Amino acid sequence: MAIVDRITYALIGALFGALVGVACWWLYGLAHSLNYHGPSIDPVLRHWVTYAGWAFAAIGFLFRQRLANVIGDTINAIFHFEVDIAPDERRGLVVGLVFLVIIVAAIWFTVPT
């Protein structure tokens, strides 16, 4: 059962890694970041999704239950970079909701119909 558990965590890591890859592609690949001022890094969505997916799949395979901590820390780091606050400083629920609305709106308006 150990290998099945590792493969399951790897698949979960690949799924969430792909979602983190999409968020990073939007923020840094297309240069829509609030704090990154410069040219887009790599505008190809496939690169962001596959690299992040494989990286988190490897982390899930190797560290199993710790995968959730890594994904949470990664999303937290992206959030704190974009909002430009220190990790120990709290702005409250309003900032989190505004950030979530911005992300959802960005994804909503960029998905082709």
Image: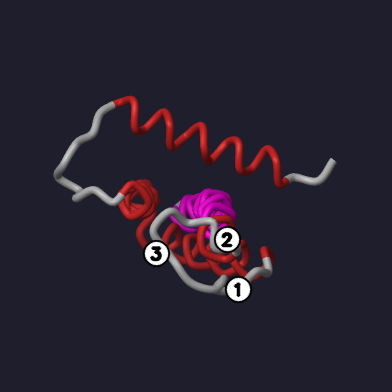
Q: Nearer the viewer, mark 2 or mark 3?
A: 2
Q: Give the residue at mark 2.
A: 25
Q: Is residue 17 left or right of residue 106?
A: left
Judging by the rendered image, the residue that carries numbered circle 1 is: 42
Q: Label 3: state its secondary structure.
A: helix
58 to the left or right of 94: right
Give the image's coloring scheme: secondary structure
**Disc 2 to disc 1: CB gap under 8 Å:** yes
The foreground one among 61 and 73 is 73
Q: Toward which corner of the image does residue 25 lie, by quadrant?
A: bottom right
Q: Main secondary structure of the magenta part?
A: helix
Q: Quick one: 99 or 8, which is closer to the camera? A: 99
Looking at the rendering, the stretch of residues picked out in magenta corresponds to: 2-24
Q: Which residue is mark 3?
A: 62
* Mark 2–mark 3 distance (CA, rounded to whole Å): 25 Å
Check if residue 7 falls in the magenta segment.
Answer: yes
The amino acid type of the residue labelled 3 equals Leu
Locate the C terminus by quadrant. Answer: top right
From the viewer's perspective, is the residue at label 1 or at label 3 nearer? Answer: 1
The amino acid sitting under disc 1 is Asp
Q: Position of residue 57 (x, y in %)?
A: 51, 61
Three-letter amino acid code of the residue under disc 2: Trp
Circle 2 residues within 10 Å: few <14, some 14–19, many ≥20: many
Residue furthest left as drawn: 88
Tag 2 secondary structure: helix
Residue 4 is at least partly visible in this image: no
